[in-house]
Image (cartoon, rainbow, N blue to C red):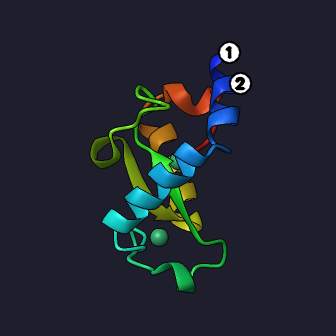
Amino acid sequence: MSRSDFYNRYIRSEEWKQTEHERMRIDSYRCVMCGRPSEKTKHGLQVHHITYKNLGHENVMADLVTLCAPCHIKMHNYLRRIRSYEDERYHPD
Ligand SMILES: [Zn+2]
Ligand SMILES: [Zn+2]
C-alpha cells in the first residue's frame, strides 16, 4: 500500500475522526490563526498536519493544528513559499 493510499484510507477512519476531534477540543473549536469559532466558518474547521511523519499515530499536540478553511489555504500557500513542502504531494491536509 502506497503512502497516499494509506492516507486516503486513514483520513476516513474512526481513529482519525477521534484524533481530529481531540485536536479541535485542545484548540477550543477555534481556528488558531484567526480565532474564528467553528459556527462562524462556512466550511467548518479543519485539522492541518504540521508534519506527516507520524501519520496514523499523530502526536496530537505537536503534529496537528486546527484551522478554518481560508487560513488553511493561507497556511499551505505560506508553506509552499518558504520551502518545498515535502508532504504536498501526498495530500494538501
Ligand atoms: Zn482562520
Ligand atoms: Zn493542511
Beta carbon of the mark 1 residue lies under 8 A of ligand 2? no
Looking at the image, residue 52 lies above or below residue 67? above
Q: Residue at 61% of width from left, 42% of height from top?
A: 92
Q: Which residue is mark 2?
A: 5
Q: Residue at 62% of width from left, 36% of height from top?
A: 10
Q: Residue at 63% of width from left, 42% of height from top?
A: 11
Mark 2 crowd level (few <14, some 14–19, many ≥20, 10 Å Cα): few
Q: As shown in the figure, which amino acid type bears the numbered disc 1?
A: Ser
Q: Residue at 56% of width from left, 53% of height from top?
A: 17
Of 15 and 38, which appears nearest the observer?
15
Q: Which residue is mark 1?
A: 2
Of 85 and 22, which appears nearest the observer?
22
Q: Position of residue 31 (x, y in %)?
A: 42, 69
Q: Position of residue 71 (x, y in %)?
A: 50, 63
Q: Quadrant of residue 5?
A: top right
Looking at the image, residue 49 lies above or below residue 67? above
- Residue 32 visible somewhere in the drawing: no
Looking at the image, residue 36 lies above or below residue 31? below
